[in-house]
Image: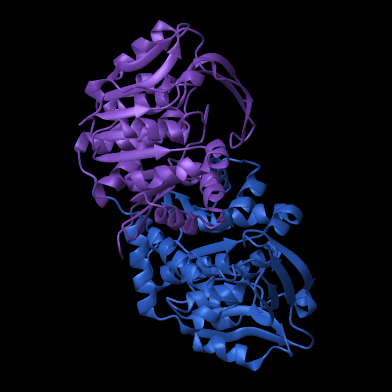
Chain colours: A blue, B purple
Amino acid sequence: MSVLITGSIALDTVKTPLEEHHDLLGGSASYAGVAAGFFTHVNLVGIVGNDFPRPYLELYQKHRINLDGLEIANGKTFRWSGEYEWDMNNRRTLSTELNVFEQFRPALPEQYRATPYVFLANIAPELQLHVLDQMQRPRFVVADTMDLWIETAREPLLQLLPRIDCFVMNESEARQLTRQTNLIKAGRMALGWGPKHVVIKKGEHGCLLFGDGHVFSAPAYPLEDLHDPTGAGDCFAGGFTGYLASVNRVDGDTLRNAVIYGSVIASFNVESFSLGRLQTLTQHDIIQRYEIFRVMSQFVAG
Amino acid sequence: MSVLITGSIALDTVKTPLEEHHDLLGGSASYAGVAAGFFTHVNLVGIVGNDFPRPYLELYQKHRINLDGLEIANGKTFRWSGEYEWDMNNRRTLSTELNVFEQFRPALPEQYRATPYVFLANIAPELQLHVLDQMQRPRFVVADTMDLWIETAREPLLQLLPRIDCFVMNESEARQLTRQTNLIKAGRMALGWGPKHVVIKKGEHGCLLFGDGHVFSAPAYPLEDLHDPTGAGDCFAGGFTGYLASVNRVDGDTLRNAVIYGSVIASFNVESFSLGRLQTLTQHDIIQRYEIFRVMSQFVAG
């Protein structure tokens, strides 16, 4: 099965204590789309300006991403720039230029509307709802968000939650949304707002999957050298949804595997800037690292 | 096999945002000893004053703790008081009265010296070395520490490391000791200083076990209501070492199980003040929660 992904597409400038790179391919939909492309075909919904580099369009296509739903508008592509502190855990947005993204109000191509799996990557909840409204009974809908929408668009976000199957947040977003310090309480409270499953991403501490009365705790890959954390969460959710679509099952065991596959893709992505590492990633690499996750977290009763 | 445990024995005053309790049984050796007692016999090495309440001595004995190595000195027992902030993650020491603990320089009873498993709970590294020097070729030695010793007794701590089998720290101690932000780097660096295994405890994020070229990532129990975090780390290490002693194996699979059993005991301990919850804990409770840990972290390839 294929997956529809909507979100932002950006040209990023990223500074870390060691490096600085300009006009990198970025945005939640770019990361999630390429991540999902390792598992299945992707129908992308997004907007770029006419300054968007052609090689990036080719990159999408190489990753099984259908661009029928990509609008190329007159004007400049959305630009973001940010800087990471020395420990890579905190980042500061240096500038945001919305440009053509300000007019993003997608009309889905007819052939996209029956896509069974959907990932609504980080954009305004109103836009996530607008896309979802155009879908014909999708089988499984995943949505992400960010601190900005929790603060400024709480109402539409809470309207979205009962309409999706899995809500993905990071640790600080979970605390901000639920006003709970304890992540177990936060996850269960978010479940109470409607989604069948909730994922809380904890960066170097792995992630938690809530649903069906269970909590699944997945480890993080034991990474020593992080080059650029940008897009890790989008790669996680893209890989997660892409895997579900590829096997076309959404039972508990499959969701756990999807969490691991999402973590695998995210762990590769942070090894280089932008989508650099994912350009050379092979199915063999993915299977090998999946196995490392298995060995890392399994124990046999004794 | 039995386990020898040395560490502090204290009367604690603990304040949380909701409760305050005085003269509770505390100290690293008390928590670790009672935790280990769920798995095997314990030889305790410690010091108390002649004000130490008799019911606490009876409590030790009920938990299979041999008191031949407990010195009852003239004077007052070590007292500690601390306060937890509303989120229970940060604590502030309000006062410390060393009292008889200042003169603690144990001479081990003859019958203790061949104990095959040893846990050197949190006391000055010089004292940990002093106890270790009196042991006859123990099979497996575990040691814990705290921020104070990393700061003030780094040299003796680094002397201790090559002489032990497993070094246990929490997240902030690991960063402080190794001056590495990345916990994977921190764990591997600590391994390089001599212990065969290193455990980094991450509280609500579980813990990491390093050694033999592997990293094992254990989840935390999904606890919603934490009443008193005091002694969780000591219960972890006591349960960990006690389990190893009880099965008398120290291979990789056994160490992973020991990490889970240690986490199980610690997760119960924080459910009430002092050793309250452990007083009513049964083998059935332990097995049930072990199973929850298993279900929480397992996934089957699909």
Q: State whether residue B199 appears in this view.
A: yes
User: For the N terminus of chain B, which image quadrant?
Assistant: top left
**Residue B195 in the image, given as x and y percentages of width and height:** 36, 49
Pick the front one: B114 or A274: B114
Q: Residue at x 43, y 21 (%)?
A: B275
User: For the C terminus of chain B, which image quadrant?
Assistant: bottom left
**Residue A134 in the image, given as x and y percentages of width and height:** 61, 71
**Residue B8 in the image, given as x and y percentages of width and height:** 45, 24
**Residue A187 in the image, given as x and y percentages of width and height:** 54, 46
Q: Residue at x 44, y 78 (%)?
A: A38
In this view, A102 is above or below B49: below
Q: State whether residue A241 appears in this view.
A: no
Pick the front one: A92 or A157: A92
Q: Quadrant of residue B242?
A: top left
In this view, B180 is above or below A48: above
Q: Report whether B68 appears left or right of B169.
A: left
Q: Residue at x 58, y 56 (%)?
A: A169
